[in-house]
Every structure is written in structure tokens, then in C-alpha cells.
């Protein structure tokens, strides 16, 4: 089984006292957060920043200190079973404008309740819940 490691960001902004989270629509139709493969000589933070820039055009990112979560899952790609680990950080941006890359078919900024309804996978829902609890504490 192949191993893969990625990093990503649960990205939010605040507008008129409302916190909104960014969800990206992936080609397979699911809604999830910014993430991508860690490249050689990159730290997970560097990967997250690069992926945010490449996938959304957003460059003003401020990490929330003390939040780091890992998820793991399995999938098949090109007849290979892959075990993937993704390290997620929580970060704030002042941006609302998204310049979507070719890697995604859509994006949406949603408040916590709506984001929780729209994010597809259980592990992503859990990340969102942990993010909201962390920000409220």
C-alpha cells in the first residue's frame, strides 16, 4: 500500500460578526477544505500556504496558534490502495474573493451551521466542529 501525506487549511473570514468557512468543490463532487501534497523540503505550514495560493488565490493567511489536527483515510488511485494522512491548520483571512484553480469546480463561503451541512465527509465535519469549538474557547 502506498503512503501519502498532505497538508491543508480550514480557512475562515469574519464579516459583520459572522464567521464564514471556505469550502471547495472537488471534481468528484464532494465539498472539502484546501489541501494538497507536501512537496520535498516543504513544511506542512508551507504546503498549506502554497495550496491556498494555488487553489484559491488567497495569500493573506493568519494561522490560529495551537490548532493542528490530523486525519487519515484510504482510497484507490490508478489501481493502487493509498493510505493518506492530512495535517490541517486553522487560519483566518480577510479575503472574500477566490480565484479558483482548475483543480476545483466551485467554492462557497458558509457560516458554521451551513458549512457543516455542506461539507461532505465525516472526517471533514469533525474538523469543522473542532475548529468552531476551538475558536469559541
Image (spheres, grey):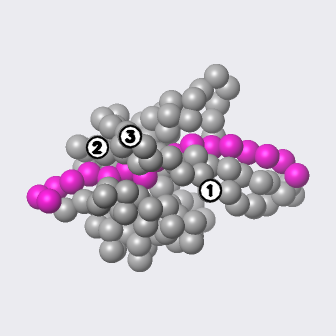
Q: Is residue 12 visible?
A: yes
Q: Residues within 10 Å of mark 2 (few under 14, many from 20)?
A: some
Residue at 33% x, 74% y is 113
Q: Which of the labelled discs sits on residue 93, or is there none? A: 2
How many labels were placed on the picture? 3
Q: Nearer the viewer, residue 126 or 101?
A: 126
- The CA span between labels 3 and 2 is 14 Å
Mark 3 residue element = strand
Q: Is residue 122 above or below residue 67?
A: below
Q: Which residue is mark 3?
A: 65
Q: Is residue 30 above or below residue 15?
A: below
Where in the figure is residue 59, as x and y percent of width and height? 34, 34
Where in the figure is residue 31, as x and y percent of width and height? 49, 65
Where in the figure is residue 124, as x and y percent of width and height? 52, 64
Mark 1 residue element = strand
Q: Which residue is mark 1?
A: 71
Mark 2 residue element = loop
Q: Nearer the viewer, residue 10 or 109?
A: 10
- The residues colored magenta run 1-17
Amino acid at each position: 500500500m502506498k503512503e501519502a501525506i498532505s497538508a491543508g487549511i480550514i480557512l475562515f473570514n469574519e464579516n459583520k460578526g459572522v464567521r464564514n468557512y471556505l469550502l471547495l468543490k472537488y471534481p468528484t463532487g464532494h465539498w472539502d477544505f484546501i489541501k494538497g501534497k507536501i512537496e520535498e523540503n516543504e513544511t506542512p505550514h508551507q504546503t498549506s500556504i502554497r495550496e491556498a495560493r494555488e487553489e484559491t488565490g488567497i495569500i493573506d493567511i493568519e494561522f490560529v496558534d495551537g490548532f493542528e489536527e490530523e486525519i487519515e483515510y484510504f482510497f484507490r488511485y490508478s489501481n493502487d490502495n493509498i493510505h493518506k494522512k492530512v495535517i490541517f491548520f486553522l487560519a483566518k483571512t480577510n479575503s472574500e474573493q477566490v480565484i479558483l484553480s482548475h483543480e476545483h469546480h466551485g467554492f462557497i463561503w458558509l457560516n458554521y451551521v451551513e458549512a457543516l451541512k455542506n461539507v461532505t465527509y465525516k472526517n471533514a465535519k469533525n474538523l469543522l466542529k473542532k475548529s468552531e469549538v476551538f475558536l469559541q474557547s
